[in-house]
């Protein structure tokens, strides 16, 4: 259980995190979603007591991180897979961490087995691929068999196999009743991993809800209609409160569901060739909601938006 | 004790401390061998002659000590450390202790190794440790190394960058302190209180370990006015103050 209250972090004039309050429940994977630069990593560092909040506080199971005894036994975290001395072996890296929290040395071999690094445990961590580093980071997070786990962008740069592995792994951890808090800037990834979402933009909370609710609320639902009698149907749709835009070979109707359009068409003897509800893509939903809060606007972004829209239609 | 074990694992599971230790010993003992080997006639080798090379080893030990901290910042393992041990003062004090102990051991091996090679090269010179001054000049080297390591760790914590910390330490120790003497009128008086000059006073005192000579087959004597005991205390005090400032800073700043 993680509870943040009024968490604020200011770097000079920049407000990286602004009055952020949220809670993360055990037994499920909670996604921490936001565009790059939204303050996700800063928030995670504050949870771990690495950065001091300018205001507010965050508690883990009711305690501040500094007050945890042997914190690795309560909170495991993977913030950056590269936080390993490149000339130290994977086993030595885990060994000193285990020692610091009086975790028995045999646990080091256990976690190496869990993440599948047992064969390379004696090799320099600097020679590891990104996927292997990521696994080592997860092994470090699991070392103290903690109830709370934090992962910052764990799938970044991984191949599909690695992504699948991590996704399954998180579900397993949550099923064991642990609190799993995982950040990402990819909503599509979160939709597959997380059942709950804490969404932030520019350091502020945008929403906290289940993933389903967020997607439903965010995605603008439209209905695609093709008909030889569009000129007859469209005025009826408009009169009933719907709006429409041209789309290749037909129209996209908003603010009205497919049931209503079908009934209108039947009542007025209009032939329909297609009546299909369109679910907006997750990326679209995400951009729509966080669109105003992206830290670094570029021309590319508008282009990306166009591409996304084109591919969704 | 647990934290000391943690820092011991960290220090000895990378290669650079071993290399630094080796280089420090080779430099110290090698330079001493040169000095002792070149003594002849009036310039008799003394206990002090055999310890001529200690500053070279000390420079390398300070590099080792600074790296022990700055690599943690460079590779992000300091964050893992603070995650495992949120009480930063304890974590950093443990590191300082382990590094200082290693410096002490390197210093003693270097000092007695230098003495031994002196005895080997000049079997006829009187290199036995006959007096307190002789003992301090040899055994004291380890203490000076340990305190110099504490200074280097403190600077490493404050600057966080390997290159910056090492450059500052070496330029200060090898150049700045001596150049202070060039300041007109007050330069010499300031120099009397510069830490490494005072550390030199602790080791060599008034030259008893070099037959009372200033220079001549031994290092020139320090201009510091404190006596040997107070010199050590002063050098330790400087190290302690720097360490306290560094710990205060580490607790305040984001990791």
Image (cartoon, coloured by chain):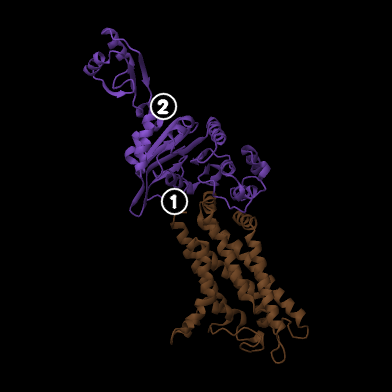
Chain colours: A purple, B brown
Q: Which residue is mark 2?
A: A212
The correct choice, above or below, for B47 with respect to A278 in the image is below
Query: Is residue B111 rendered to the left or right of residue A52?
Result: right
Q: Are marks 2 and 1 in contact (CB under 8 Å)?
A: no
Mark 2 surroundings: few (<14), some (14-19) or many (≥20) residues within 10 A? some
Q: Quadrant of residue B232?
A: bottom right
From the viewer's side, name the closer residue of B246 and B125: B125
Q: Is residue A128 above or below residue B88?
A: above
The residue tagged with tag 2: helix, strand or loop?
helix
Chain under disc 1 = A
The residue wearing badge 1 is: A51
Residue A54 percent across, percent down from the top left: 37, 51
The percent position of residue A83, horizontal first and vertical second, equals: 54, 50
Query: As drawn, is A43 to the left or to the right of A137?
Result: left
Q: Position of residue B107 (x, y in %)?
A: 65, 71
Q: Is residue A147 left or right of residue A313?
A: right
For the residues marked 2 and 1, what is the alpha-carbon distance in whole angstroms?
32 Å
Density class for disc 1 (Cα within 10 Å; few <14, some 14-19, many ≥20) is some
Check the picture and name the quadrant holding the C terminus of chain A: top left
x 35%, y 15%: residue: A275
- N-term-proximal mark, 2 vs 1: 1
């Amino acid at each position: 259980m993680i509870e943040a209250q009024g968490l604020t972090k200011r770097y000079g004039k920049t407000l990286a995190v602004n009055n952020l309050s949220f809670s993360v429940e055990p037994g499920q994977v909670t996604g921490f979603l936001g565009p790059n630069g939204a303050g996700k990593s800063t928030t995670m560092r504050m949870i771990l007591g690495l950065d001091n909040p300018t205001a507010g506080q965050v508690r883990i199971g009711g305690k501040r991180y500094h007050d945890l005894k042997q914190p690795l036994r309560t909170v495991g975290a993977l913030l950056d897979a590269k936080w390993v001395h490149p000339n130290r072996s994977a086993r030595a890296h885990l060994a000193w961490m285990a020692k610091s929290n009086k975790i028995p040395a045999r646990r080091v071999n256990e976690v190496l087995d869990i993440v599948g690094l047992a064969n390379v445990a004696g090799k320099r961590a600097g020679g590891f691929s990104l996927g292997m580093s990521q696994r080592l980071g997860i092994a470090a997070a699991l070392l103290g068999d903690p109830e709370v786990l934090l992962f910052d962008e764990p799938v970044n740069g991984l191949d599909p196999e690695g992504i699948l592995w991590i996704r399954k792994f998180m579900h397993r951890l949550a099923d064991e009743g642990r609190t799993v808090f995982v950040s990402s800037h990819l909503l599509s990834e979160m939709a597959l991993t997380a059942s709950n979402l804490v969404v932030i933009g520019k350091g502020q909370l945008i929403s906290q809800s289940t993933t389903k609710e967020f997607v439903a609320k965010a995605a603008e639902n439209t209905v695609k209609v093709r008909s030889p009698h569009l000129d007859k149907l469209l005025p009826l749709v408009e009169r009933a409160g719907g709006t429409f835009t041209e789309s290749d070979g037909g129209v996209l109707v908003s603010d009205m569901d497919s049931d209503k359009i079908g009934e209108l068409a039947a009542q007025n003897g209009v032939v329909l060739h297609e009546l299909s509800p369109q679910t907006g893509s997750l990326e679209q939903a995400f951009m729509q909601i966080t669109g105003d809060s992206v830290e670094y606007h570029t021309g590319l972004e508008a282009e990306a938006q166009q591409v996304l829209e084109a591919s969704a239609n | 004790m647990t934290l000391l074990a943690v820092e011991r694992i960290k220090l000895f599971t990378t290669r650079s401390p071993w290399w630094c230790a080796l280089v420090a010993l080779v430099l110290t003992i090698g330079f001493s061998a040169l000095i002792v080997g070149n003594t002849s006639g009036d310039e008799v080798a003394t206990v002090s002659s055999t310890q001529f090379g200690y500053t070279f080893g000390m420079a390398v030990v300070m590099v080792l000590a600074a790296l022990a901290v700055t690599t943690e910042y460079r590779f992000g393992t300091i964050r893992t450390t603070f995650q495992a041990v949120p009480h930063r003062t304890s974590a950093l004090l443990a590191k300082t202790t382990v590094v200082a102990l290693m410096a002490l051991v390197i210093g003693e091996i270097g000092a007695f190794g230098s003495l031994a090679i002196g005895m080997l090269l000049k079997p006829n010179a009187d290199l036995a440790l006959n007096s307190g001054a002789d003992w301090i000049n040899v055994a004291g080297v380890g203490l000076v190394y340990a305190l110099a390591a504490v200074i280097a760790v403190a600077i490493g914590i404050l600057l966080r960058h390997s290159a910056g910390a090492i450059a500052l330490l070496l330029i200060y120790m090898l150049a700045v302190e001596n150049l202070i003497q060039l300041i007109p009128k007050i330069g010499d008086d300031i120099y009397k209180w510069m830490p490494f000059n005072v550390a030199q006073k602790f080791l060599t005192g008034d030259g008893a370990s070099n037959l009372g000579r200033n220079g001549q087959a031994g290092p020139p004597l320090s201009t510091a006015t404190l006596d040997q005991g107070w010199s050590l205390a002063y050098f330790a005090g400087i190290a302690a103050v720097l360490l306290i400032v560094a710990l205060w800073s580490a607790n305040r700043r984001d990791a």
